[in-house]
Image (cartoon, rainbow, N blue to C red):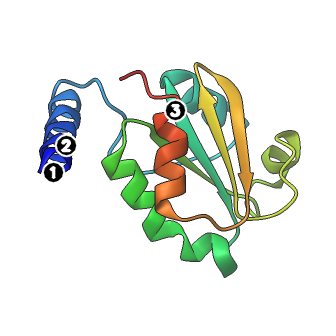
């Protein structure tokens, strides 16, 4: 029962923060180049960057990543490495899917390969301001 109550409280807190403009966008932001990438990373306290290519595991993770964007206070940015090869190279991305976590504008974590939603949420919660 206590765990259920805590879950409800957490959900309400996140809803209030979003209503007051304190959270991140409820949907992923599609990055369209290096400048947009830098602006996105700088604009939010915690950002999950999902590097993907059309087809394969990266594309299959789209619903997971969209769910993470809705349910966490982190901003989620998506980078198509086929369309933005230069940006992917600048960031040292060697394969997809790759996930980077940025906190206060600095990359703090990198996870390569397919991951489950709970792993991403736990990772983001480590850096969340609340």
Q: Is residue 96 left or right of residue 21?
A: right
Task: Find residue 129 and report its horizontal and vertical position in percent.
Answer: 42, 21
The answer to which of 45 and 8 lies nearer the viewer is 8
103 shown above or below 66: above
Give the alpha-carbon distance from disc 3 to disc 2, as whole Å. Answer: 17 Å
Local crowd size for mark 1, using a 10 Å CA cut-off: few (<14), some (14–19), many (≥20): few
The residue where tag 3 is placed is 126
Residue sitting at x 54%, y 36%: 47
Residue beneath disc 2: 11
Q: Which quarter of the picture shows residue 109? A: top right
Please provide percent x and percent y for residue 36.
61, 35
Tags 1 and 2 in contact by the CB under 8 Å rule?
Answer: no
Secondary structure at numbered mark 3: loop
Residue 83 relative to residue 27: left or right: right
Residue 60: where, in percent of width, then height? 56, 77
Asked if residue 80 is positioned above or below residue 124 in the image, the reply reads below
Q: Please name which of the two marks, 1 or 2, marks the residue nearer to the observer.
A: 1
Residue 116 in the image, given as x and y percentages of width and height = 54, 65
The residue positioned 70% from the left and 63% from the top of the image is 97
């Amino acid at each position: 029962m206590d765990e259920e109550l805590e879950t409800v409280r957490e959900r309400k807190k996140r809803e209030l923060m979003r209503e007051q403009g304190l959270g991140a966008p409820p949907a992923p932001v599609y990055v369209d180049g290096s400048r947009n990438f830098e602006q996105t990373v700088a604009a939010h306290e915690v950002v999950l960057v999902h590097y993907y290519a059309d087809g394969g595991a990266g594309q299959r993770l789209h619903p997971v990543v969209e769910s993470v964007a809705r349910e966490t206070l982190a901003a989620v940015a998506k980078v198509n490495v086929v369309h933005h090869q230069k940006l992917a190279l600048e960031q040292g991305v060697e394969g997809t899917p790759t996930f980077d976590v940025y906190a206060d504008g600095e990359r703090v974590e990198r996870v390569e390969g397919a991951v489950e939603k709970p792993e991403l949420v736990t990772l983001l919660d480590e850096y969340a301001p609340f």
